[in-house]
Amino acid sequence: MDEMTVMTCVAHIRAAAKLCEDAGMLACWANLLGVADQLLESADIAATVGTDLRRDI
């Protein structure tokens, strides 16, 4: 995935996490933030080693 796609996905995941937080669903909120962090880390690792994340999907 390119950087714009990753950042768009992260923004949507964080928006969903905010809805969970507002609804008091803190376990869901924490899980979604963890997913967003993992996606960002995966993108950073892929950029560092020069791999294309689309191959892993």
Image (cartoon, rainbow, N blue to C red):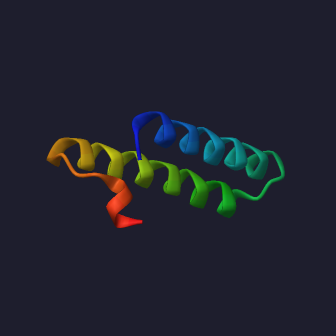
On the rendered image, what quadrant is the C terminus found in? bottom left
Residue 15 locus on image (x, y percent): 69, 41
Residue at screen point 70% across, 57% down: 26
Q: Residue furthest front?
A: 55
Along the line of sight, the residue nearer the viewer: 23 or 52: 52
Residue 37 locus on image (x, y percent): 45, 49
Residue at screen point 56% across, 51% down: 33
What is the quadrant of residue 32 in the picture? bottom right
What is the quadrant of residue 24 in the picture? bottom right
Q: Is residue 31 left or right of residue 17?
A: left
Residue 25 locus on image (x, y percent): 76, 59
Q: Report the label total.
A: 0
Residue 20 locus on image (x, y percent): 76, 52
Q: Residue furthest right?
A: 23
Q: Residue furthest top?
A: 4
Along the line of sight, the residue nearer the viewer: 54 or 47: 54
Q: Is residue 11 left or right of residue 26?
A: left
Along the line of sight, the residue nearer the viewer: 48 or 31: 48
Residue at screen point 38% across, 57% down: 54
